[in-house]
Amino acid sequence: MNLVLLGPPGAGKGTQAKLLLKGRNLVQLSTGDMLRAAVAAGTELGREAGAIMGRGELVPDALVIGLIAERTDEGGKADGYIFDGFPRTIAQAEALDGLLEERGSKVDRVIVMEVDDDALVERIAGRFACAKCEEGYHDTFRLPKVDGICDKCGGTEFVRRPDDNAETVRARLKAYRAQTKPLIGYYRRQGKLRAVDGMADISEVASAIGQALDMR
Ligand code: AMP
């Protein structure tokens, strides 16, 4: 089962991807995570991508397609992939179809997470994560149980993404509308698209996605 999670920044794709991994032999491929790792490692790719990410724009298709091509070579033993934040353009979607076809596989299901624009800015601007284990938190929706200490690993340092500020979020939303939204029609025409209400509680969204995966 190869699954694409589609939706604007802040819709909860990463959160839901992690929940979907539980009890399933799937591999999560997040181009955002891969690019942030390249930025942190200071590679040439990271330097090129970092400046673009800081502006809230999309990095060039060839670059992210290359990252995904490397990683889809690795996941031999898994039952499939959860693509989170990829594809983001029609060219990326076509490249993904080609990559999977070469491996005798295909995109089976695409979930689009629908969220109000106003909620997105609040969701994104409040989020932070444990610097050690990357557990996600939020100023309004989910603070650590003990102030300043990660619930999961006991870490005491937290980080915020540099592109999670109001100005960059607006640019990211614009990029989503202009370049990524057309994927909804692309996958709907193929009969693969299912929409879920991304405004519901995390667990409700997870169960709606579970149902959408079982639907024929
Ligand atoms: P994300 O963590 O998915 O919100 O991605 C963070 C940033 O990384 C985006 O705002 C883009 O600049 C870049 N990025 C991530 N995935 C892609 C992609 N598939 N295509 C182009 N740019 C991407």
Image (tube, rainbow, N blue to C red):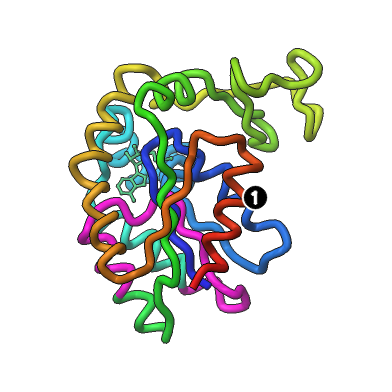
The structure residue drawn at horizontal position 47% and vertical position 42%, both measured from the top left corner, is: 197
Q: Does the magenta segment cover residue 91?
A: yes
**Residues in magenta, as a range:** 73-97
Q: Residue 47: where, in percent of width, then height? A: 33, 38
Q: Is residue 208 left or right of residue 58?
A: right
Label 1: element kind: helix
Relative to 193, residue 115 above or below: above
Residue 78 x, y percent position in the rendering: 61, 73
Amino acid type at mark 1: Leu
Farthest-out residue, bottom: 104
Which quadrant holds residue 213?
bottom right
Compared to residue 208, the image places residue 3 above or below, namely below
Q: Which residue lies furthest to the left in this view?
A: 178
**Badge 1: few (under 14), some or many (20 or more) residues near its Cα, within 10 Å?**
some
What residue do we see at 21% from left, 46% from top? 179
Q: Which residue is drawn at 42% across and 52% down?
A: 195
Q: Name the residue under label 1.
A: 19
Which residue in the rendered view is the most extreme toward the top? 147
